[in-house]
Image: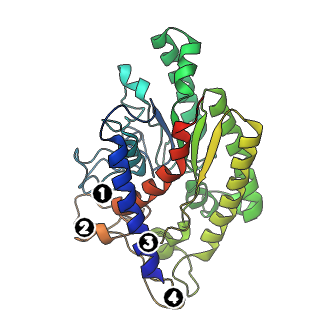
Amino acid sequence: MASMRKLLWWVLVLLMECASFHLCIHGEPQVPCYFIFGDSLVDSGNNNNLQTLAKVNYHPYGMDFPAGPTGRFYNGLTPADIIAEHLGFEHYIPPFATASGGEILQGLNYASGSSGIRNETGRNWGANINLNKQIENHRNITSHIAGMLGSKESAYELLNKCLYSVVTGSNDYMSNYFMPQFYDTSSKYSPEQYADVLIEQYSQQLRTLYLLGARKVSIQGLLTIGCTPNATHTYERKGTICVDSMNNAAYIFNQRLKSLVNQLNHDLSDAKFVFVNIFDIPFTNTYAPGLNIEISGCCEVDINGLCIHNKGVCQDRILSSFWDGFHPSEAVNKIIAAVTYTVVLPLLYEPQ
């Protein structure tokens, strides 16, 4: 059963690769601009100059990326990079930290490794750019765009047509709720209460994006955070392959997030928000409980779960689910991107 699920996912990837090639080989991108918010799952280099342990601008990161180590937390492309290819952009969307000039008109990547919905999330790693700050950075960019185009109205006419992708929430669990040595959230809230707290803040953040012009918004749910190599090597699994308590918390959050997306679509009827479910993507080769199966990444990791500088990596990266202790491989990112593109495709042709 598990092998069949993986086969189906790979078939989906191949179909989506063909579909995107057919759609985007000629002509302009399917949207004029693409803005990305989130954490290390989509960070493309915004953490490189921050005082943090959560930065990866060194080998072996980027070993399968044309430019080498850039601050992407993978061996190769992020899901956002692959989606940009599907959308027909000639270049990957640049990180906010290094973007300049007219390139901001095609979008920016504001994502920051270790960041989350809550401001304090991930601070155990050092500095990061939390989602509130990312949105504030975008507010400033919208003002720059208005200046470049001559008016606020012209800027919003452009921004209304752009695609917005938000990928966050994992660290609010992995680098907050499940780290009681640094944070008190697990002693203050049950998993249900914590999900409610997160969703309340997330709602306000997404509504602010709407006020800044967002009308086509993709919101990615959490993956099975209890199946990451770091989680399975750190927490008690009680005879199962993954850490069930972490996956259960992520599932609760995802259910609340689906409801939030429905509410946003009801309240903000001139916009369209879509939920991207990646929770069901299979990250292990088998799900048989009770077996002593270890989930490992492709690279040798340090105590923090990141690849050790210049150490060797596995040879079968295309068959590996995880790259390091936290992040999927580029091969899995192609699945995530294919799922996301399938969900957002109807948004791309809706009139504004």
Please tell me which residue lies in front, 307 or 327. Answer: 327
Residue 288 - label = 4
Residue ID for mark 1: 75
Query: Which label's residue is closer to the chain start, 2 or 3?
Result: 3
Callout 4: helix, strand or loop?
loop
Q: CA distance from mark 3 to mark 1?
A: 24 Å
Q: Residues within 10 Å of mark 3 (few under 14, many from 20)?
A: few
Marks 4/3 in contact by CB < 8 Å: the verdict is no
Residue 138, how many percent across, how many down? 53, 28
Q: Furthest residue to the bottom?
A: 290
Q: Which residue is mark 2?
A: 313
What residue appears at the point 44 percent right and 32 percent down from the top-left corner? 108
Quadrant in the picture for residue 323: bottom left
User: First in sequence: mark 3 or mark 1?
Assistant: 3
Residue type (three-letter) at the residue carrying disc 2 = Val
Q: Is residue 61 above or below residue 291?
A: above
**Which is more toward the observer, 254 or 275?**
275
Looking at the rendered image, the disc whose residue lies closer to the viewer, 3 or 1, is 3
Amino acid found under the numbered disc labelled 4: Ala
Answer above or below: position of 166 versus 279. above
Residue matched to label 3: 8
Nearer the observer: mark 2 or 1; the answer is 1
Report helix, strand or loop for mark 3.
helix
Q: Earlier in the sequence, mark 4 or mark 2?
A: 4
As drawn, the label of residue 263 is none
* Disc 2 from disc 3: Cα separation: 27 Å
State which mark lies toward you, 1 or 4: 4
Colouring mode (rainbow / by chain / secondary structure / one colour): rainbow
The residue tagged with tag 2: helix, strand or loop?
A: loop
